[in-house]
Each structure stands twice: as structure tokens, then as C-alpha cells.
Amino acid sequence: MRISVKAPAKINLTLDVLAKRQDGYHEVEMVMTTVDLADRVDLTLLAGDEITLECSASFVPDDERNHAVKAARILKERFGVKSGVHIYIDKQIPVAAGLAGGSSDAAATLRGLNRLWGLQLSLEELAVIGEEIGSDVPFCVYGGTALATGRGEQVKLLSAPAPCWVVLAKPPIGVSTAEVYGNLNVDNIREHPSAQEMIQAISDQDFLGMCRALGNVLEEVTLPRYPQVRQIKNLMIESGADGVLMSGSGPTVYALVQKEAKVCRIYNALRGFVKDVYAVRLLGGTEAEVLAQIRT
């Protein structure tokens, strides 16, 4: 038996850091949503007692360093599952891009194995397990649009935002999330984005209000250190994007665009600058749509 699960990328509509916690993490407040750029996770039931992983991207680890393997291991050991699984990841989301690709693969693995192994766990229960894997995994279990607080693991689902195009561009560099957070001085943040303004704009289906409310305090660290990220952001603005923001700790930057004619102009301008450019739509989905992403 084999199950295929869609693992969509996420973008941050807002990302605020409120304080450094005693456990070493940061207290955050983020509004996140999913976009139609996705990996595909194929889960094949094995009679033997093993977990194996194969990925279309050769540089992705195939052992416990991979969040999908870790997710499978936790489920298998916690619930005494005797059968094994072969995980195949068709990788479409760029790696180390601020798009939660690894976290989404882990979440897809949790959702798919819940069905493949007949565990009958709720999404809420899977999200709690996801906390052990990574801060973004609980959000990725639900998908759609949500407010995430704590270290990112506390998720409150929101309605879908106004539909629009999203143009994403990733420069050929890696950015360390730990390094970015480590160099952020919370006391010196110049401007905190308002998650409540973003939530209101989403609720009102106010696309321009959503664009005005975009904000990510990690840009204060990443943009000065990585000029290519700033160049991409400036190019998107100059090309007429309605709203532009870096996702997560970077290096991916995205543009929100309402009119399709602008999408081509922005996409073509970026393709002359970087290779990894994608024009996709917001997903925004509901819990029912998340469940519909699992196919036998």
C-alpha cells in the first residue's frame, strides 16, 4: 500500500520576535500561510521493521537528521508499530530557504503515516507530536493560514486570505536560522509588525490591507548581511509588486501580486537575476483541504 501526501511551502505574512526565552528559543508572533509550491511525500508500507528514505534532491540527508525520518521514528516507537515504511520525497521546495520545506515534509509524513498505519490520531494530536520535531511542524500539520505564537508551536487557525499570486525568489545562498536569531537584539528592533492588523485584513478579505501589514523583524539582521536578499526585495518593489517581504530568516523573498499581468513582469525581471523563481498561488486552505491532500 502506498499513500502520497502534498507538503506545501509556507510564507510568513508577519514575523515578530517578542523576547528571548530561558530555554534558548525566542518568543514569536507570526501569521503564516501556505502557497502552491509543494514537495510530494510518498509513503510505502514495508513488511520489515525499518524506516528508509529516498529523495529526488541528492544533498538532502536520508537519516535521523531528516525531519521526515524523525517523524516516522517517533510515531513508530510511540505507538508500537511493527511494520516499516519507505519514504520518497519529490523535492520541489528549495532547501534552507525560509519556506519550511523540511517541516512540511515531516508534517506530511505524520499525516500520511497516521492513515497508513491506522493510528486514528487527530490533527491536534499530530501537531503536539510535531512540536518535538520542529517549531514550524505543528503549523504545517494543519496547513492553511494561522497565527503561531510561543516558539511557533502554538497554532490558531485563521480564515483564508484574499486570493492572489505569489512570486518567490531564492538567491543561491544559504542562511542559518540560528545565526539570524542569534544576531537579533530584541531590545533594538526598530518596528514590530502588527499580527492583529494582518488578521483583520485577512478577515476582511482586504488584499491591500494585507500588503500594508506585511512585516518581518528578521529582515533587520538578514538584509544587511546578505546583499543579494536586499537586491531581490528592491527589484520586486521596482517591478511593481503590491507587497514584498522576506519569508522566515530568508533568503527567500516573495511578492504578493493581484494582477496576473504584473506576475509575468516580476517573474521575468527576477529570472535575469536568480535561477530559483516561482510564480504560484496562495493556498490558504481549511482542515478539510489538508485532509484532501492525502491520496491512497
Image: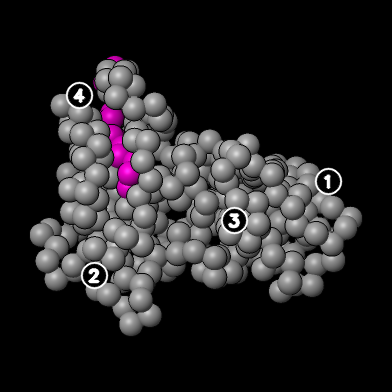
- Left/right placement of residue 127 relative to residue 182 reads right
How far apart are labels 2 and 4 at the CA level? 33 Å
Mark 3, Cα crowd under 10 Å, few <14 / some 14-19 / many 20+, is: some
Q: Residue at x 68, y 52 (%)?
A: 112
- Closer to the observer: label 3 or label 1? 3
Say whether disc 2 or disc 3 marks the residue closer to the N-terminus. Answer: 2
Say whether disc 3 or disc 1 marks the residue closer to the N-terminus. Answer: 1
Three-letter amino acid code at the position of disc 4: Ser
Mark 1, Cα crowd under 10 Å, few <14 / some 14-19 / many 20+, is: few
Q: Where is residue 177 shown, x and y percent of the image? A: 36, 57
How far apart are labels 2 and 1 at the CA level? 46 Å
Which type of secondary structure does the marked residue at label 1 adopt?
A: loop
- The residue that mark 2 highlights is 18
Mark 2, Cα crowd under 10 Å, few <14 / some 14-19 / many 20+, is: some
- The residue that mark 4 highlights is 239
User: Where are the magenta residues, as a range?
Assistant: 250-262
Q: Residue at x 35, y 50 (%)?
A: 175
